[in-house]
Image (cartoon, rainbow, N blue to C red):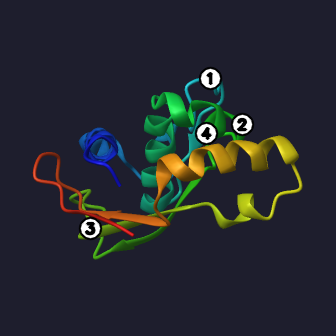
């Protein structure tokens, strides 16, 4: 992954992490995309991180159409290690490209995924819940 793309994802993670203090189970709602008019109620910390990550990825021109086309379900948060919902932090979040999309029958979606595959160049991204000195691992 190029340094430029790594910097973009560090900025996204920083923005996601800066909103963690707003999370309250079954109380807070968030939008998955910029164009979504309906807020989704967050019933878990994983869901909140996933929604915020997808929303921030809408601001990447190379991913905007794909995130909007999947209604904000391009990425999935599969794990929050050592999460502390009271303090709204975690040791590690694992975000992957939604595997359900790879099995889709939608040809337009498959074309968009192919275009984005070169840009993304990762199967998972892991990060901690800090805002500045983010520990990020890309696989």
Among the 4 quarters of the image, the one containing residue 116: top right
Q: Where in the figure is residue 132, as x and y percent of width and height? A: 12, 46
Q: Point out the image quarter for the N terminus.
A: bottom left
As drawn, the label of residue 84 is: 3
As drawn, the label of residue 8 is: none
Q: Answer yes or no: do the residues labelled 4 and 1 have beta carbons within 8 Å?
A: no
The label nearer to you, 1 versus 2, is 2
Q: Answer yes or no: do the residues labelled 3 and 4 have beta carbons within 8 Å?
A: no
Q: Is disc 3 surrounded by few (<14), some (14 to 19) or many (20+) residues within 10 Å?
A: few
Q: Where in the figure is residue 94, as x and y percent of width and height? A: 41, 67
Q: Is disc 2 surrounded by few (<14), some (14 to 19) or many (20+) residues within 10 Å?
A: some
Q: Which residue is drawn at 63% across and 43% down?
A: 115
Q: Where in the figure is residue 57, as x and y percent of width and height? A: 47, 38
Task: Give the residue number, with chain letter if any, for mark 4.
Answer: 67
Q: Answer yes or no: do the residues labelled 2 and 4 have beta carbons within 8 Å?
A: yes
The Cα–Cα distance between marks 3 and 4, rounded to whole angstroms, is: 28 Å
Task: Give the residue number, with chain letter if any, for mark 2.
Answer: 69
Q: Is disc 4 surrounded by few (<14), some (14 to 19) or many (20+) residues within 10 Å?
A: many
Q: Tag 2's secondary structure? A: helix
Q: Answer yes or no: do the residues labelled 3 and 2 have beta carbons within 8 Å?
A: no
Q: Is disc 1 surrounded by few (<14), some (14 to 19) or many (20+) residues within 10 Å?
A: few
Q: Answer yes or no: do the residues labelled 1 and 2 have beta carbons within 8 Å?
A: no
Dot 3 or dot 2, earlier in sequence: 2
The label nearer to you, 1 versus 3, is 1
Among the 4 quarters of the image, the one containing residue 90: bottom left
The Cα–Cα distance between marks 1 and 2, rounded to whole angstroms, is: 11 Å
Task: Give the residue number, with chain letter if any, for mark 1.
Answer: 35
Q: Is residue 116 left or right of residue 135?
A: right
Q: Residue at x 43, y 36 (%)?
A: 56
């Amino acid at each position: 992954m190029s340094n430029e793309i790594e910097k973009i994802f560090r900025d996204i993670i920083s923005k996601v992490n800066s909103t963690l203090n707003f999370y309250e189970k079954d109380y807070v709602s968030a939008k998955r995309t910029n164009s979504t008019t309906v807020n989704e109620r967050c019933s878990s910390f994983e869901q909140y991180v996933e929604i915020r990550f997808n929303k921030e990825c809408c601001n990447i021109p190379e991913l905007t159409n794909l995130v909007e086309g999947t209604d904000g379900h391009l990425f999935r948060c599969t794990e929050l290690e050592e999460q502390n919902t009271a303090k709204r932090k975690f040791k590690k979040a694992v975000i992957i490209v939604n595997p359900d999309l790879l099995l889709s029958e939608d040809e337009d979606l498959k074309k968009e995924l192919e275009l984005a595959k070169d840009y993304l160049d990762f199967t998972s991204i892991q990060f901690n819940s800090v805002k500045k000195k983010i520990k990020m691992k890309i696989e």
